[in-house]
Image: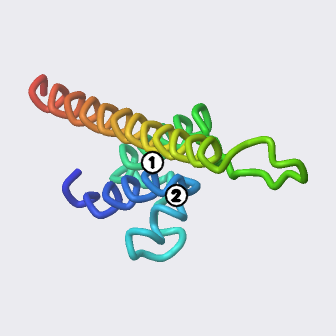
Amino acid sequence: MSNNSHYIEAIDQLVLERAEINLDTVALRAGRKRGSIKRGRLSQASLVKLIDDTAAQQRQSPAAPLVKPKKQAAKTKSKKSDDSIVAKSEIYQKALQKMVSIQFENHRLRMMVAKLETQTTD
């Protein structure tokens, strides 16, 4: 898995940026060409599974867009309440990012444990 470390770092970056995660975007972010990660390569099977699982987690918990204050003709809301909504939304976004990052790290560690368990049983 150490030879795929640049791909894993790319996945981490994409998760934090909430960018779409697929084989091509991970390859491009890792500084490789589109199509450098292939589903048919046995050496990349765990990497492909990690990318698919991360993309599935991303689809299950899409991050909500930031709440933007609306312009209203009648100013019923004060600027303070609008700032409060935006601040709470930013806190929410950071919490979501942290949760997805922790889920990704948990998955990555489980994959490493599974790999180590199969090596010790052989």
The quadrant holding residue 20 is: bottom right
Q: Quadrant of the C terminus?
A: top left
Q: Residue at x 44, y 41 (%)?
A: 49
Q: Residue at x 14, y 32 (%)?
A: 119
Please provide percent x and percent y for residue 86.
58, 47
Look at label 1 and name its amino acid. Answer: Val
Q: Which residue is mark 1?
A: 48
Give the colouring mode of the picture: rainbow
Q: In terms of depth relative to the viewer, which is nearer, 119 or 92?
A: 92
- At label 1, counting other C-alpha atoms closer than 10 Å, the crowd grade (few under 14, some 14-19, many 20 or more) is some
Q: In terms of depth relative to the viewer, which is nearer, 65 or 122?
A: 65
Asked if 59 appears above or below 19 in the picture, the reply is: above
Q: In terms of depth relative to the viewer, which is nearer, 61 or 86?
A: 86
Give the residue at the far left of this rendering: 120
Residue 33: assigned label: none
Name the N-terminal-most of marks 1 and 2: 2
Give the residue at the far right of this rendering: 73
Look at label 2 and name its amino acid. Answer: Leu
Left or right position of 80 against 120: right
Left or right position of 99 against 88: left
Q: Secondary structure at mark 2?
A: helix
Please provide percent x and percent y for residue 83.
58, 48
Q: Secondary structure at mark 1?
A: helix
Q: Are marks 1 and 2 in contact (CB under 8 Å)?
A: yes
Asked if 61 appears above or below 78 in the picture, the reply is: above
Q: Which residue is mark 2?
A: 23
- At label 2, counting other C-alpha atoms closer than 10 Å, the crowd grade (few under 14, some 14-19, many 20 or more) is many
Q: Residue at x 27, y 29 (%)?
A: 110
Q: In terms of depth relative to the viewer, which is nearer, 96 or 85?
A: 85
Left or right position of 7 against 2: right
Left or right position of 84 against 110: right
